[in-house]
Image (spheres, helix red, strand yellow):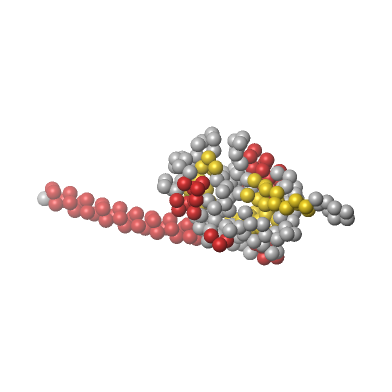
Amino acid sequence: MGNCSRRHFIAYMGSAIFITGSDARSEDIHVAQKSNTTRYGMLHNELRCIGCNACVTACKKTNVVPDGVSRLEIIRTVDVPASEGVKAIRQFFRKSCQHCENPPCVSVCPTGASYKDSQTGIVDINDKRCVGCRYCIAACPYQVRFINPVTNTADKCNFCRDSNLAEGKKPACVSACPTKALVFGNLDDPDSDIAKMIKANPVYRSKLHLGTEPKVYRIPGKYGEIQK
């Protein structure tokens, strides 16, 4: 009788846990889907960028990026010297994480340290789970990841998710840009500045043929798209 009672109790508790757990998971999924209304992206206006590197400096300071590595680079792609009656022409390309919709760095990570945040679309790294295997670095077609020499874990741009964004501010690079060449915001909000800029201007994204669906858009300079 005692054994039977114990069996019934265990069976009852197992059923209760299963039902409660299922309801909890369903509720979590429902809440996540309901609140998943933000998909952050960035636009780099190559017509406005002057290559001053103020964005790089601000990023390193705000996110405490060690010397010798950087989450962001500004690469000169066009350099036409001034001639008689013609001003010099320089164009620059922003090299940083693209926050892909289909990030290959996430799929190759053996520990789940690399992930795409379901609430914001930001591709990020959990440095507590990263083992520094460099698989994500090899998989990234944009070559924007590196090993942080202090933490010995993978690192990259995360739109200042843990710093400025967490405080309700724009990413440091956006705020620091003297020519307003960078626009950041919710791609899914048609009233956001970035959505309006993309709609009103010719834009391109890098390496679309790979199917990564990057969320960094670019307004091309005078000489058109620069593939990097």
Residue 43 location (% of width, % of height):
66, 56
Which residue is situated farthest in the left direction here?
1
State the image quarter where residue 189 is shown: bottom right
**Quarter of the image with the C terminus in it:** bottom right
Q: Residue at x 35, y 57 (%)?
A: 22
User: Horizontal placement of 184 versus 85: left or right?
Assistant: left
Drawn side of residue 82 relative to residue 217, left or right? right
Work out whether 81 lies above or below 198. Answer: above
* Residue for point 17% across, 51% down: 7
Question: Count of labels shown?
Answer: 0
Q: Is residue 75 above or below residue 196?
A: above
Q: Is residue 95 above or below residue 63?
A: below
Q: Residue 53: horizontal and vertical position, in percent?
A: 70, 44
At x 44%, y 40%, the residue is 131
The answer to whether any part of residue 145 appears in the image is yes
Nearest the camera: 160 or 137? Answer: 137
Residue 80 in percent (x, y) is at 78, 52
- Residues 36 and 196: in front is 196
The quadrant holding residue 208 is bottom right
Res 37 seen here: no
Q: Which residue is depicted at the point 68% across and 45% down?
A: 55
Q: Looking at this view, is 193 or 101 the one in front?
A: 101
- Foreground residue, 169 or 78? 78
Q: Is residue 91 left or right of residue 2?
A: right
Q: Position of residue 65 (x, y in %)?
A: 60, 38
The answer to whether 82 is drawn above or below residue 57 in the figure is below
